[in-house]
Amino acid sequence: MPTVAPASAQDAISISILGATGSIGASTIDLVLADPDRISVDSLTASTNAEKLAHEARRVGARLAVIADPDRYGELKAALSGSGIEAAAGRDAVVAAAGRPVDIMVSAIVGAAGLAPSLAAIGAAKAIALANKETLVCAGSLFMGAAAKAGTEILPVDSEHNAIFQVFERENAGEIAEVIITASGGPFLRMPREALATVTREMALRHPKWVMGPKITIDSATLMNKGLELIEAFHLYPVEPDQLSVLVHPQSVVHGLVRYRDGSLLAELGEPDMRTPIGYCLSWPRRRPTSVKALDLAAVGTLTFERPDRDRFPCLVLAEAALREGDGATCVLNAANEVAVEAFLQGRTGFTDIPVVVERTLSHMAASGPLAAPASLDAAMDLDQTARQIAREGLDFKGTVAS
Ligand code: NAD
Ligand code: MG
C-alpha cells in the first residue's frame, strides 16, 4: 500500500456502506482500511450474510451493522458480541441506517432493493457515492430531483460514469456533443447468435475483465448493463438520449469519454479496478493515492473500439427504447430484467430468454398507454412489483417465451 499522508481534521470523513458484503462493498472496505485515520465508518448493511457482515464491521470499527433478513438478527448479534457494535435487522432498519447523518453514503446494494435506502440517504448524507445504478433506472427523475432539492451531491461510482464525471465540464455543458460509455463486450462478444441460446450460468459468470457480483456480471454478458448505464448517464448528466452512445472496447482501459463541439474528445483511462472510481468518490474534490496498479499503456499496446452488435444483444436495444419512453418504462425494464436474470442464475430459464421476458413485460404493461414516471417511492415500488409479477407469469409460460 502506498503511504497516505496523515489526515488533517478537515480531511476526515465519516461514511456508511449499504451492501457492505458485496463486490463494491469489499473494494470500499479495502480503501477504508488503507486510510483509517481519515475515513471512519458509521454503518454497514448486508442482505443475509450475518457472519461476513459482523467480520467487516469489526475490521472497520463500525458503530452499527444491519442485516436485511430479520431471521439473521440472532446470528449477527452473537457474531458482534463483545465488540460494542450495535446490531439491527430488517428492511426498515436498513433504510433507517441509510438515514443516519454521514459525509458520504456508499450505496452499493444490488437491484431495486437499493432504491428506498438510497432515497433515505438524501438530506442525511452530504454526498451519496452511487454504485446502485438500479436506483436511477427505477426512479431516476425522482431521485435526482430529491437530491438537488436537498443539496446532496451524487458522486457516480460506476466506472464509466465516474470517468465522465472527471471529464464533464459542467461550465461547458452546452458545448458537449456526445457522451460515450465503453463496454468490454462481455464474455460473448464474438459468439455467433445461434450459440448464445446454449450459454450456461457458468459461462456467463466468467467476465473477461471485471470481478463483480452475479447480477451485474449477467447484465454485462447480455449488454443490459450498458443499457442500464445509458439510462444512468441520462439522469446523471444534462444530456439528451441521442447524445449518449456506447463503444465496445474489449481492453476496458478507456472507461468513458466526452466529445466537445470544438473537436476535443476527453477520456479517463485506468486499470479496470473499482478502487479507482470509489477512491475518487471518497476523496472528491481532491485526489489521493490508492494501491491500484498504474496503467502501463505500452504494456497494453493496442486499444480497439467498435460499435455494439444490436442484433445479437437485444437487451441494449430494449434499454435504449425504454430510455426514450421515460422513467415508467425504465422501471419496468429493470424489474423484468431482475426477474429474468434471477431465473437464469437459478437455471430456470435460458440466456436468450432474458430479453424476451423483458420485451414481453414492457409490451404487456404499455398496452394500455404510456407508463407514467413514478412520482414517489411508493409509486416506483408498485410499478416494480407489478412488472415483476408480469415477468414471472411470462417465465411460467417458458415454452412460449423461448419460441
Ligand atoms: P454484489 O452482489 O456483490 O453485492 C450486493 C450487496 O447488496 C451485498 O452486500 C448484499 O448483501 C446486498 N443486498 C442484496 N440484496 C439486498 C437487499 N434486498 N436488501 C439489502 N441488501 C441487499 O453486487 P455488486 O457487484 O457489489 O454491485 C452492487 C451495485 O453496484 C449494483 O447495483 C451494481 O450494478 C453496481 N456496480 C457494481 C460494480 C462492480 O464492479 N461490482 C461496478 C459498477 C456498478
Ligand atoms: Mg459500469
Image (cartoon, helix red, strand yellow):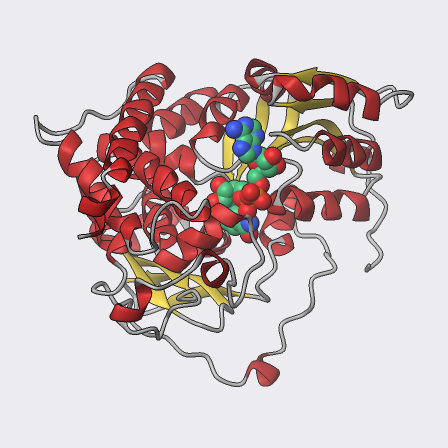
Of residues 325 and 337, the one nearer the viewer is: 337
Residue farthest to the front, as pictured: 399
- Relative side of 322 to 40, left or right: left
- Percent across and percent down for residue 62 are 78, 28
- Relative side of 248 to 104, left or right: left
Q: Is residue 45 above or below residue 179?
A: above
* Residue at horizontal 91 percent and vertical 21 percent from the top: 82
- Percent across and percent down for residue 350 are 33, 53
* Residue at horizontal 38 percent and vertical 39 percent from the top: 338
Residue farthest to the left, as pictured: 368
- Relative side of 302 to 137, left or right: right
Q: Is residue 178 above or below residue 295?
A: above
* Residue at horizontal 25 percent and vertical 69 percent from the top: 194
Residue farthest to the right, as pictured: 82
Q: Quadrant of residue 55?
A: top right
- Percent across and percent down for residue 50 are 71, 29
Q: Quadrant of residue 148?
A: top left
Which quadrant does the N terminus fall into? bottom right
- Relative side of 305 to 64, left or right: left
The answer to whether one can see residue 356 in this image is yes
- Percent across and percent down for residue 166 are 50, 54
Q: Is residue 117 above or below residue 323?
A: above
* Residue at horizontal 76 percent and vertical 32 percent from the top: 51
Of residues 107 and 212, the one nearer the viewer is: 212
Number of marks? 0
Q: Is residue 12 above or below residue 117?
A: below
Of residues 393 and 371, the one nearer the viewer is: 393
The answer to whether one can see residue 100 in this image is no
